[in-house]
Image (cartoon, rainbow, N blue to C red):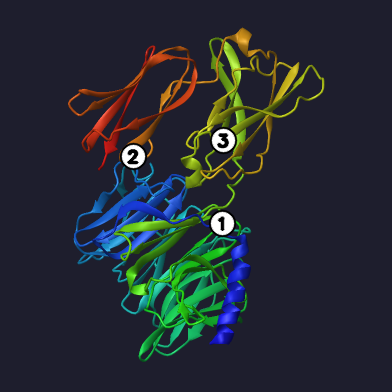
Amino acid sequence: MKYLVFILIVLFSTSLLAQNWTSVIETEVDVSTATGVVDVFANGHGLHVIYQEDNALKYCRMDVEGNLYAGSPFTLESYSAVVWPSISGDANTIYVLYKKSGETSIKTMYSTNAGSNWSTLGSSPTGSNADFIESIYSEGKLHVTWQVSNQVKYSNFNGSSWSSPYTVSSTENGYFPRIAAWNLNNENKVYFYYQNSSSVSKWREYNITNNSWGNIQTAFSVSNSTPSGFAVDGSKIALFYNYYDAPMYYFQWVIRSKSNNSLLCTRTAEPSYPQLLYSTTTVDEHMHSVFWFNWYADEQEFPGIWRSRGDDDCSIDEVYVNNYQEQQNVHFINTSASSNDVYVIWQDDYISDNLRLIYDDQTPLVPQNLSVQIHSEGGATYPKLNWSFNNEPDVFIKTNAYQVWRRYNLSGGPWSDWSIIGYRDGDENQYIDYTVSGLYAEANTAEYKLKVRDYTNHFSDYSSSVSVNFSEFNKISLGYVLNEYGLKQNYPNPFNPTTTISYSIKTAGLVTLKVYDVMGTEVASLINANKEAGKYSVEFNAADLPSGIYFYTLTSGNFTATKKLILLK
């Protein structure tokens, strides 16, 4: 045992060096009545969580601080018996798959506006009388695996129809299937992991591009074992499982080469309860699997949540450890990644009824697809920059996340230095440069690039640049400013008792910002003053108001906008 402890300490200390875990965040997602599966999917709009209750399937959307967005939680399904719900998606669409007990087909719900509205997919995989369902979205297709009797089935949805179900387990038995995808380095593959018998589990690869299936491979052969979960990267597959050796359960994993199934390493955890394990993949080509793990040093127990990144030596790094915890207090451990940030959720009933959140906070990716086009206004033309949103929830909520940089060359002279000319929030992806007009005249050139920062002020590298030719370069003589009218949703929302309201003013003048109750009675006047053009934020303290729904209205010149806020005490 002491030799094992020494190895563990060495592995922990070396793997911790590259990590940047946040502090633990207490979220607003109450799972005190949750039963069965709690699943999470992260994209640029936030963290999307589904969980089962005794009488419903619920959906919540929260930000990286654990605050719920308006409309959460939302009941996706009020039927009492929902079988194996699974959530996945991409930057724009969220999919939730499940089956209702007593029905034979898999049901798919989807949202294209960050969970605000949901629709039901009109079709389902044929013959999908599923006992176990898991899904993954990859390269424009929704992939789903399920168990029917003693077979593992697979189908994919390409946006219009489902493919014919394929028997992954072929002529042999297959139970408790899991699915993962790998779509980096010009590969587009899906992987499956399932139980073949009480002592043998298998895995298999499907190449979507070539529509070809690899041979069925042996994952492990251990008596009284069941698959727990798995993960893949470009060259390896990590396979986790539980096994029972009376009177205790053990947790073990192996890492194998994908090319020839050779064994790279194996590891056994201290005795523990059986657990399901969830994995995710980041764009830096790492797999990430999180699980409960007990280890001992100097007669002290350090149980907690740990992560494997599929290293050849089966090393792991610490996610969260508290030496008073026991595994039976911790439930619903799950993970999802967006770009290179890895999000881990769990519930610890020793501490709270709510989900807890921690994430490996990495540098945001470089902004992509920067382009420039003509914007016409008042008889003049200006450069309008467009770019793709960073698919990162900790960028989405950041004020002034995108920096717009510019340099210029006047009449063939030397280039100016690069300088910041403006900002855009994480949920904005356009910028009009009103200081440059008369586009595509040949005298002068303006060149633009972007940089982005996340919620904790990690900065990306610069984007690629774009340029335009122009004739004028004088904001004052043109009489234009860099702002537009706008009123943003308060943050956080719901809130208790303070929240921040942000707004922007296009031209100087009288600005009023007032809060009303549902009867239309004014309950607070936050702004009633002349303001210069620009962006502003104001804090609203509702400590003296009762819980409820309120509305706030911004008025400036001919512009008026109203939004709803929710006070929960």
The residue type indicated by label 1 comes to Asn
Looking at this view, is 217 or 316 the one in front? 316
Query: Which residue is situated farthest in the top direction here?
Result: 477
Query: Which residue is situated farthest in the right direction here?
Result: 413
Q: Of callouts 3 and 1, which one flags the residue occurring earlier in the amino acid sequence? A: 1
Dot 1 falls on a residue whose secondary structure is loop
Q: Nearer the viewer, mark 3 or mark 2?
A: 2
Q: Of callouts 3 and 2, which one flags the residue occurring earlier in the amino acid sequence? A: 3
The residue type indicated by label 3 comes to Tyr
Q: Can you identify the residue that label 2 sits on?
A: 493
Q: Residue at x 60, y 67 (%)?
A: 15
Q: Which mark is residue 20?
A: 1
Picture quadrant of residue 249? bottom left
Q: Can you identify the residue that label 3 sits on?
A: 402
Q: Position of residue 443 (x, y in %)?
A: 76, 16
Dot 3 falls on a residue whose secondary structure is strand
The residue type indicated by label 2 comes to Asn
Cα distance between the residues tagged 1 and 2: 27 Å
Which quarter of the image is occupied by the C terminus? top left
